[in-house]
Image (cartoon, helix red, strand yellow):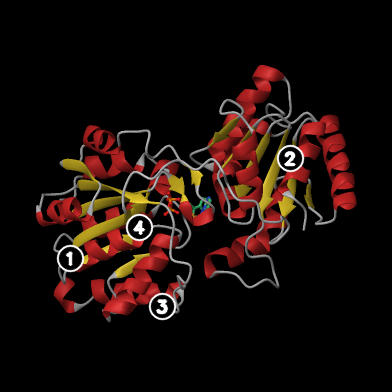
């Protein structure tokens, strides 16, 4: 293992002063170290990985220096367009270091949503013509790799990737945590929503711990999983999956359990929902102001008026609740959709939180069985 500080110091030696990205669990220590040691002008936690490449590009244009972009390999998809149509040598030729967490590396046990991405990570970078090196967890080798990486970036003026394996970094705990603005935990909030829902309700839950918590709540309540779609990958897209389901099944009530980070990643989804106006659509935002599932780095979630944005996009109603009582009363107030409830929740999850025991495909079949049953035809 190496200390996150070592990589940060080596990057500083190379005059890297600007960081942007979306946090990742494998990069947790590095992201936390960057958050704690870089000022807010030079560290922008991006809403999505493509935006991070664009922010890094703007920094380069303004300073001539080499920026750094960090991401989980799941985020490569979001970054492909600006990498190939902005930073690439065939277009504007913008140098940057990409630090990419390698979930789903072959031979390492990981969640199903990471397996394919892990298998193709190096091949994807190669196909994009981005040189990549798997960062060593030995200090001397790491120094050598950084020297080679920066020689290549300076020579070609294009992006270069450092791919990070699991357990490369020694633990470093984020110091700069924003105070919580709600007293319910995310899991308590989800349980209140589930307990208040009727038998016709179906749920689409977001990436990260929210889906794991929903799964465990259903187990605890003995309700089965046939009414839930766990969006374990595809961060930020749960609400769009739900939108078409709601439009196709007007007799069903559809609820999205979204995260603030996921909402911000593809905020345009609100406009699509607000303008499609499904009456059977309820959007619940579990807002802890953080990427809680991958280390708690701040999002902009608590700095913006989410209900205001939803209403401006065409939602029929939207409000914020901060306690169990307020949540129960907002749930009891049956509104015509689309409507949104932002629940301010506290950061953190149970230490013993499990993972779904059924596969994504079984999950899909369970939900489709419910949606394609005679009653729904
Ligand atoms: C495209 C993409 N980028 C990054 C990730 C890594 N990731 C998984 S969960 C998560 C945080 C989600 O934050 P939020 O939606 O606020 O939910 P919370 O974890 O706070 O409940 C991130 C960044 C991912 N899965 N996919």
Which is more N-terminal, label 3 or label 1?
Answer: 1
Front position among marks 1 and 3: 1
Which is more N-terminal, label 2 or label 1?
Answer: 2
Crowding at dot 1, Cα within 10 Å, few <14 / some 14-19 / many 20+, comes out as: some
Which is more N-terminal, label 2 or label 3?
Answer: 2
Crowding at dot 4, Cα within 10 Å, few <14 / some 14-19 / many 20+, comes out as: many
Residue 225 at least partly seen: no
Badge 3 marks a residue whose secondary structure is helix
Front position among marks 1 and 4: 4
Crowding at dot 3, Cα within 10 Å, few <14 / some 14-19 / many 20+, comes out as: few
Would you say the residues marked 1 and 2 are in contact, meaning their CB atoms lie under 8 Å apart?
Answer: no
On the image, the x and y values in percent for residue 23 come to 56, 47
**Which quadrant of the structure image shows residue 311?**
top left
Q: Which residue, given by chain and number where applicable, does mark 1 sit on?
A: 197
Using the image, tell me which numbered label, if any, was put on residue 186. Answer: 4
Badge 2 marks a residue whose secondary structure is helix
Residue in front for this viewpoint, 9 or 273: 9
Using the image, tell me which numbered label, if any, was put on residue 362. Answer: 3
């Amino acid at each position: 293992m190496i200390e996150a500080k070592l990589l940060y110091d080596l990057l500083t030696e190379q005059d890297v002063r600007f960081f942007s990205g979306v946090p990742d669990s494998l990069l947790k220590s590095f992201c936390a170290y960057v958050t704690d040691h870089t000022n807010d002008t030079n560290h922008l936690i991006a809403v999505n990985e493509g935006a991070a490449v664009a922010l890094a590009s703007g920094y380069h244009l303004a300073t001539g220096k080499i920026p750094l972009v960090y991401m989980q390999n799941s985020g490569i998809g979001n970054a492909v367009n600006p990498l190939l149509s902005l930073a690439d040598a065939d277009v504007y030729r913008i140098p940057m270091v990409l630090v990419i967490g390698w979930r789903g590396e072959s031979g390492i046990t990981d969640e199903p949503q990471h397996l394919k991405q892990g298998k193709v990570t190096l091949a994807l970078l190669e196909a994009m013509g981005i040189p990549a090196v798997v960062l060593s967890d030995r200090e001397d080798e790491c120094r050598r790799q950084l020297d080679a990486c920066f020689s290549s970036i300076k020579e070609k003026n294009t992006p270069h990737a450092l791919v990070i394996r699991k357990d490369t970094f020694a633990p470093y705990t984020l110091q700069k945590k924003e105070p919580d603005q709600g007293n319910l935990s995310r899991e308590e909030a989800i349980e209140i929503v589930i307990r208040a829902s009727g038998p016709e309700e179906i749920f689409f839950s977001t990436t990260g711990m929210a889906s794991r918590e929903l799964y465990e709540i259903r187990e605890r309540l003995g309700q089965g999983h046939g009414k839930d779609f766990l969006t374990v990958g595809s961060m930020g897209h749960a609400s769009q999956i739900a939108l078409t389901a709601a439009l196709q099944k007007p007799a069903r009530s559809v609820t999205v359990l979204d995260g603030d980070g996921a909402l911000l990643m593809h905020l345009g989804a609100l406009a699509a929902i607000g303008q499609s106006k499904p009456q059977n659509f309820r959007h619940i935002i579990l807002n802890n102001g953080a990427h809680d599932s991958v280390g708690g780095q701040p999002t902009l979630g608590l700095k913006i008026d989410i209900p205001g944005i939803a209403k401006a996009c065409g939602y029929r109603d939207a409000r914020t609740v901060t306690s169990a009582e307020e949540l129960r009363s907002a749930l009891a107030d049956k509104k015509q959709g689309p409507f949104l409830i932002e629940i301010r929740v506290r950061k953190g999850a149970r230490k013993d939180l499990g993972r779904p025991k059924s596969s994504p495909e079984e999950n899909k079949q369970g939900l489709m069985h419910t949606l394609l049953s005679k009653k729904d035809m």
